Amino acid sequence: MENLFCKNTGKALTALCVMAVTLFTGCGYNENTQAKTNSNTATEDHLKDEEDVITNDERSTENMLKLFINDEEMQVIWEENESVEALKNLAEDKPIIIDMSMYGDFEQVGSIGQSIPRNDKQMTTSAGDIVLYSGNQLVVFYGSNSWAYTKLGHIENTSAEEMKKRLGSGDVNVTISITE
């Protein structure tokens, strides 16, 4: 009887060991496969991010809008929206030249010559903001105002004082063109 018990215990232990090895090896394989899959996905995401950076760099030099105030180029961070795309399309044939007029001692405003798509939102502007008003008016701020506009961009690296000096002492011309 004791011999039978030992044989059955031996078989049971052997079976248990085989199951344990299979269980641990199988899980390890799954974890390794999952780790490799995650690693591959991370690598693919990283490569995609690098492609996006290249695309964004190319976009920054190709077909970008330039804005000039009285023939002085301003550094503008343009929004990515339908209105800016429409301005780009208008400027492809020839530069858009806008005669601006002072208004309210905080902005210069002028007609772009036609209506373009707009997505007005209530906002408070600050010096350097460039917005679309009523779908056909370009506004450049040297002060602040609260109204519903479509934001087009912002003039960077220029203080509020410099904007007031540049825009607050008479009418100006604004030219919007495309970099070639």
Image (cartoon, rainbow, N blue to C red):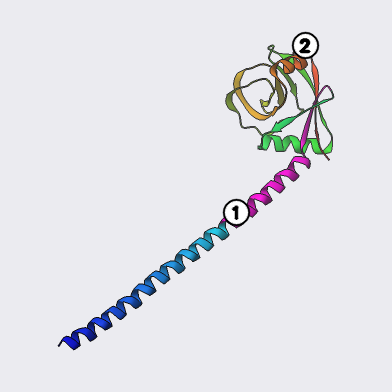
Q: Was residue 60 drawn as part of the magenta stretch in this picture?
A: yes
Q: Which residues are magenta?
A: 42-70
Left or right of 102? Residue 93 is right
Q: How far across and how far down the image is residue 9, in percent?
A: 23, 81
- In the picture, the disc for residue 105 is none
Q: Quadrant of residue 13?
A: bottom left
Question: At 49% from the left edge and 62% from the top edge, which residue is drawn?
Answer: 34
Residue neighbourhood size for the residue with mark 2, other residues' Cα within 10 Å, grouped as few (<14), some (14–19), many (≥20) = few
Quadrant containing the N terminus in the rendered view: bottom left
Question: At 39% from the left edge and 69% from the top edge, which residue is drawn?
Answer: 24
Q: How far across and how far down the image is residue 94, in percent?
A: 84, 35
Quadrant containing the C terminus in the rendered view: top right
Residue named by callout 2:
169
Residue named by callout 1:
45
Residue 38 position (above or below residue 63): below
Q: Single out the mark in the foreground, 2 or 1.
A: 1
Left or right of 43? Residue 76 is right
The kind of secondary structure element at disc 1 is: helix
Q: How far across and how far down the image is residue 115, in percent?
A: 71, 30
Left or right of 41? Residue 73 is right
The kind of secondary structure element at disc 2 is: loop
Q: Tell me the distance, in whole angstroms, between the alpha carbons under discs 2 and 1.
A: 51 Å
Disc nearer the start of the sequence (2/1): 1
- Amino acid marked by disc 1: Asp
Question: At 56% from the left edge and 58% from the top edge, which residue is drawn?
Answer: 41
Residue 162 position (above or below residue 176): above
Q: How far across and how far down the image is residue 119, in percent?
A: 61, 32
Q: Quadrant of residue 167?
A: top right
Question: Magenta region's main secondary structure?
Answer: helix
